[in-house]
Image (cartoon, rainbow, N blue to C red):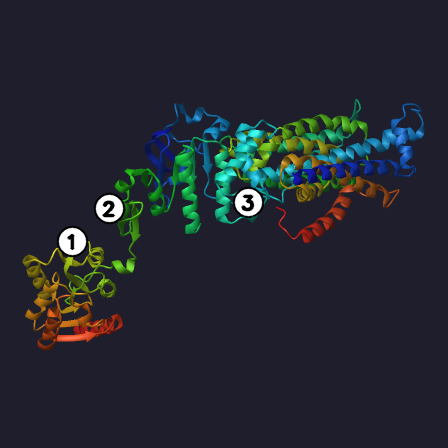
């Protein structure tokens, strides 16, 4: 019983933290507002053309929501990949997704395919396509006799990732004038966030999450080892397929709108595991909320620290998350994996 | 319950299992034994649907194994795997609850019945006291009991175990097998267990299957399978079979290689040992270690010394249990003595029954005789002085040496032996 209450409080606290962080983030920026004003603007229906309203509802709110979705998505994908592959070093990009998305974007920029077609911005579309094609290739490379052995999957992902990184570097070298643009994208940023981005990614994000939620209980059993799981009645191959495809969809959707923001997918799952243990039914929501909150905070720092210049948020996540994670490792002194 | 028909299985080119047939009946406990790499674990993996046989059929009850979904199979059959190491911080309670997985819906909601089953299993396996502990903080034996508890809550009709006691100490070995036997008897689970430990599994199971190089070598009652011929042949090692006096089941004794070197066929040094009642056991060991050819006489069958001599393949002049020495035996004994270079007389007690063992010595004036003289002959004389008199007479007339203990015996024999080699 004691454990349940613990978990309940932890979730309650991090949800409260998330709301608080969101409101503070909405009030921060070149136009400073008090949190009270922020809440008032969000919940008032009138004054639609008011400039404050535009700042909050059209600029800051989508950015925070997108920040949450990206952070949560990367953390969820990290939890799933770490669980399925049973390896603590795995992050969502391990299967070559970021390299695939990056290659797509680099191609679009270098080959000057960058245009808006009926409101569609090509950058996220090419990123998404690149990510999905890569996962498809990696998945099929790893497939042997209808099964997908996780180690083969991992190695295929790493190998394909290397090849794509080489392709990307080559494209960057021949298209030197676009170098900065590409690097900026690769480092990851939420600076172009809009409601459009959210609409673009949310269907895949949701489909991926539904696929994962259906198999959370089975993922717990897979942690014990695939043979254990099968003896306990889990159709391991089917479960793995759904989980891998679900996590890949989420990662692809996230990468397409934010670039490859590093570190969140690797460490947030570990922090969540420290808090609530290895049970995925608890780990999934905890990691999602923590990841979302972490990215919103990092994005604030990215916006504010050198204002009016923006630092790519990927740099902030690594710079703040890394030392914090090391601190946790040293402090807990117990094996967290 | 479980029926295998003509199971063939290969890893790539290499065929591991050949035409395996057997039938596990309801509520039966079958043990599978065989050397390393004989295919035991592979067979178990075929039965638990981790591997698909190339040929043949596996029936679970009336249905083919392949017709079961993983979930339905998990309700019928539970598996305790060889390696139960778990790298995640689940509590014992949560881990055992995972055994309820086949009975739960997609969201893993825990119902009252699940809790009850888990509590029962924790009690049955005596793991209740650490149900809130992390599985990682348990010892190997405790963890294995938890894994068995997890298997119990699956409410299986068939329990498969792969080396359930590998790397456990004897207390846990007994503990785990008692538990399995209990599940077999009280909860009516059929059990199929693979084990390296011939002696352990032989004490518990109803039938044994001996597998060798992927074939069923022998199958049947424990006594039919655990025989000197079968085990020596399959394991390619020299063993002997004894019976556990309490369970009346056979068990295998290993004979170390050093004790098993072919005795020198041509060696000319032969010792004849007169002993009885266990007094000759140590002497036999010493002589055997020195690879000396030994004959013993006259011993009653069933006597401790007789058993030992038989085990060491010594030549023995024997008579029925508790019978006095008859003329025929005396004659045979004399033959052995005349062939020997040295006669050793252990410190066995003498009565009317074995008096003749000493009396014959008087005829061999030219032979060396070694007496073990502690305790004194007077204390071991149950013939009202007759044997003592005989003893002293032989000492006077024959070539007699004396020593107090085995140490003296060793050095005496070594001396003798060397001397003989030089000559």
Q: Quadrant of the N terminus of chain B?
A: top left
Classify mark 1: helix, strand or loop. loop
Quadrant of res B412: bottom left
Identify the residue under disc 2: B229
Q: Residue at x 46, y 34 (%)?
A: B78
Q: CA distance from mark 3 to mark 2?
A: 46 Å
Which of the 4 quarters of the picture holds residue B346? bottom left
Q: Given the image, what chain letter belongs to the residue carrying mark 3?
A: B
Tell me what residue is drawn at x 51 percent, y 42 percent. B146
Q: Earlier in the sequence, mark 3 or mark 1?
A: 3
Q: In the rendered structure, the residue with mark 2 lies on which chain?
A: B
Residue B86: x percent and y percent?
54, 44
In the displayed structure, would residue B383 be above or below residue A114?
below
The C terminus of chain B sits in image quarter = bottom left
Apparent side of residue A230 relative to residue B11 in the rendered image (left or right):
right
How many numbered discs?
Answer: 3
Look at the picture and state if B141 lies above or below B341: above
Left or right of B189 on screen, residue A206: right
What's the CA distance linking mark 2 and mark 1? 27 Å
Per the image, label 3 sits on a secondary structure element best described as helix
Taking the spot 29% from the left edge, 51% from the top edge, the residue there is B237
- Above or below, B340 relative to B148: below
Q: Which residue is mark 1?
A: B321
The answer to whether any part of residue B165 appears in the image is no
Discs 2 and 1 carry the same chain letter: yes
Label annotation for residue B129 = 3
Q: For the residue carrying disc 1, how many other residues have a C-alpha within 10 Å: few (<14), some (14-19), or many (20+)?
A: few
Q: Residue at x 54, y 28 (%)?
A: B103
């Amino acid at each position: 019983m004691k454990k349940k209450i613990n978990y309940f409080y932890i979730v309650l606290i991090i949800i409260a933290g998330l709301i608080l962080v969101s409101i503070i983030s909405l009030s921060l920026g070149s136009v400073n507002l008090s949190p009270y004003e922020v809440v008032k603007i969000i919940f008032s229906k009138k004054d639609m053309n008011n400039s404050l309203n535009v700042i909050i509802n059209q600029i800051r709110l989508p950015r925070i929501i997108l920040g949450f979705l990206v952070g949560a998505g990367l953390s969820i994908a990290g939890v799933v990949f770490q669980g399925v592959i049973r390896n603590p070093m795995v992050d969502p990009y391990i299967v070559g997704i970021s390299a695939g998305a990056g290659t797509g974007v680099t191609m679009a920029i270098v080959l000057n395919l960058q245009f808006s077609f009926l409101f569609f911005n090509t950058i996220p579309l090419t990123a998404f396509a690149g990510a999905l094609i890569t996962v498809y290739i990696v998945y099929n490379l790893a497939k042997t006799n209808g099964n997908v052995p996780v180690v083969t999957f991992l190695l295929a992902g790493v190998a394909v990732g290397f090849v794509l990184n080489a392709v990307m570097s080559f494209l960057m070298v021949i298209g030197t004038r676009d170098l900065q643009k590409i690097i900026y994208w690769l480092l990851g940023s939420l600076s172009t966030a809009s409601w459009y981005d959210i609409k673009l990614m949310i269907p895949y994000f949701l489909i991926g999450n539904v696929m994962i939620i259906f198999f959370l209980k089975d993922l717990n059993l897979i942690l014990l080892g695939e043979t254990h799981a099968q003896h306990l009645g889990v159709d391991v191959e089917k479960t793995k397929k759904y989980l891998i495809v679900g996590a890949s969809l989420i990662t692809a959707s996230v990468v397409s709108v934010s670039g490859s923001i590093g570190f969140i997918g690797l460490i947030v799952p570990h922090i969540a595991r420290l808090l609530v243990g290895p049970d995925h039914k608890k780990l999934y929501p905890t990691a999602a909320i923590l990841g979302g909150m972490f990215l919103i905070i990092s994005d604030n720092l990215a916006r504010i620290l050198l204002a009016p210049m923006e630092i790519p948020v990927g740099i902030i996540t690594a710079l703040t998350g890394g030392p914090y994670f090391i601190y946790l490792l040293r402090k807990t002194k117990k094996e967290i994996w | 319950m479980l029926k295998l028909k003509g199971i063939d299985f290969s890893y790539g080119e290499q065929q591991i299992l050949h035409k395996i047939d057997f039938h596990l009946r309801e509520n039966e406990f079958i043990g599978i034994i065989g050397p390393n790499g004989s295919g035991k674990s592979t067979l178990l993996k075929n039965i638990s649907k981790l591997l698909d046989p190339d040929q043949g059929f596996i029936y679970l009850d009336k249905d083919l194994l392949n017709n079961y979904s993983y979930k339905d199979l998990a309700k019928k059959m539970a598996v305790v795997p060889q390696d139960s190491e778990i790298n995640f911080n689940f509590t014992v309670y949560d881990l055992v609850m995972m055994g309820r997985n086949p009975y739960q819906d997609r969201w893993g909601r825990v119902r009252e019945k699940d809790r009850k089953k888990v509590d029962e299993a924790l009690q049955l396996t005596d793991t209740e006291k650490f149900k809130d502990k992390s599985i990682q903080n348990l010892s190997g034996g405790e963890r294995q009991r938890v894994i068995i508890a997890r298997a119990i809550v699956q409410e299986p009709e068939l329990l498969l175990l792969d080396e359930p006691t590998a790397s456990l100490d004897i207390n846990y070995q007994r503990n785990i097998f008692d538990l399995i036997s209990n599940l077999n008897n009280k909860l009516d689970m059929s059990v199929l267990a693979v084990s390296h430990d011939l002696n352990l599994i032989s004490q518990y199971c109803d039938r044994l299957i001996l597998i060798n190089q992927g074939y069923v070598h022998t199958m049947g009652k424990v006594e039919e399978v655990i025989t000197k011929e079968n085990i020596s042949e399959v394991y390619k090692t020299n063993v002997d079979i004894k019976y556990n006096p309490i369970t009346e089941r056979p068990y295998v004794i290993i004979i170390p290689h050093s004790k098993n070197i072919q005795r020198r066929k041509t060696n000319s040094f032969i010792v004849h040992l007169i002993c009885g009642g266990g007094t000759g056991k140590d002497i036999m060991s010493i002589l055997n270690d020195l690879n000396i050819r030994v004959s013993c006489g006259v011993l009653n069958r069933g006597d401790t010394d007789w058993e030992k001599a038989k085990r060491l393949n010594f030549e023995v002049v024997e008579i029925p249990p508790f019978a006095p020495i008859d003329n025929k035996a005396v004659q045979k004994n004399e033959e052995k003595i005349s062939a020997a270079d040295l006669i050793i007389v252990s410190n066995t007690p003498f009565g009317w029954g074995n008096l003749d063992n000493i009396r014959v010595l008087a005829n061999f004036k030219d032979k060396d005789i070694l007496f073990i003289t502690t305790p004194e002959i007077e204390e071991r004389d149950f013939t009202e002085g007759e044997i003592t008199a005989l003893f002293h007479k032989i000492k006077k007339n024959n070539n007699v040496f004396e020593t107090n203990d085995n140490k003296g015996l060793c050095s005496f024999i070594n001396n003798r032996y060397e001397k003989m080699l030089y000559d």
